[in-house]
Image (spheres, rainbow, N blue to C red):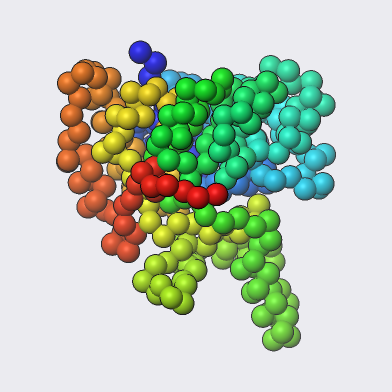
Amino acid sequence: MKRTELLTAAGSLSEMVRYMEAGADGIQIGEQQFGMRLPGDILSGELDQAVRLAHEAGAKAYVAANRIMDNAALPLLPGYLEKAARAGADAVIFGDPAVLAAAGEAGLSGLVFHWNPEMTATNYATANYWRGKGAVRAILARELSMEQVLEFKRSCQAEIQVQVHGMTNIFHSRRRMVSSYLDHLQTKEGKEPQPEASRRDLAADKGMYLIEEERQDERYPVYEDQAGTHIMSGDDLCMLDTLHEFLEAEIDSLKVESLLKSQEYNITVLRAYRAAMDAYYANPQEYRFRQEWLETIEEIQQRDRPLSYGFYFKEQVY
């Protein structure tokens, strides 16, 4: 039986180690210059050490280059991909075809790719097209139902990855809206706009929310990085009690989203999913969900962020 990967993203080398100890056997890493919604920067100069740490722990390391690239990024891409290849990264995550072009320019024919177009990976035909271009994995849109995911798995020639826990991205703009607004206020008051570093720190603050006038009780976290502005869901996906459905279907990779969560929260979640997955693989026929796995998460879950099944069991209209 093929074992499914438990995946998360880490923003530092120490965070990588803690998440692998908690049960992650796949780690997304990289720097915000090339990746989107990373929980921190593991710079290109640290890739050798990061990949080595992952491999020593029996885990895989995937380097994120999934930004929508602008012209300024193009000259830098081949060098970044070369460093990922030299470090022995297990794959590079991309959405923009410019990444594949840069790999070709650098002569990196052996580099493995995961296709991640964010919200538009909604059918297996497109995933199969990118499989023909060298992408061995497709990272699916969060709006797919369980039925659609299972159909995707049956018909897709590539591995597939889905999210099973954490907040989901519901809006993205390449504009850094909050930072631009703050700069506008500073200028209006006759002050100099804040330097880039200060704006970046402020934009990543966990206290920023979008609140709709009609639904004052729902808060949508706003996150900014170098890729732009991201508005996140008002609840947290949690598929722990239905995890066996993904495992029975041999979905290749299940991601726990670590963004805007504390290390302790992410470690608790990873341990719970690891326990459930290990119990399933120990005896698939006799597997039973244990409520205490979920209770460990519920004990530390923010009261204003309910756990939900996302779109897995509801119809989504495109």
Where's residue 168, x and y in %? 47, 50
Question: Would you say 305 lies left or right of 136 here?
Answer: left
Q: Which residue is situated farthest in the bottom direction here? A: 189
Quadrant of res 139: top right
Residue at 28 percent of width and 20 percent of height: 281
Give coordinates of residue 161: x percent, y percent.
Answer: 48, 31
Q: Quadrant of residue 290?
A: top left
**Looking at the image, which is closer to me, 67 or 75?**
67
Whether residue 90 appears in this view of the structure is no
Question: Please, is residue 277 above or below residue 195 in the view?
Answer: above
Q: Residue furthest top?
A: 1
Is 258 drawn above or below residue 255 in the view shown?
A: below
Residue 306 image offset from top left, x and y in percent: 31, 57
Depicted 179 relative to depicted 105: above or below = below
Image point 40% across, 74% down: which residue?
Answer: 216
Instruction: Kindly identify the residue that appears in the image at 23 percent across and 43 percent down.
Output: 294
Q: Of residues 87 and 65, which is closer to you in this image?
A: 65
Does 293 sit left or right of 143 as displayed? left
**Residue at the spot x=24%, y=51% of the render?**
298
Q: State whether residue 302 appears in this view.
A: yes
Q: Is residue 103 left or right of residue 84?
A: right
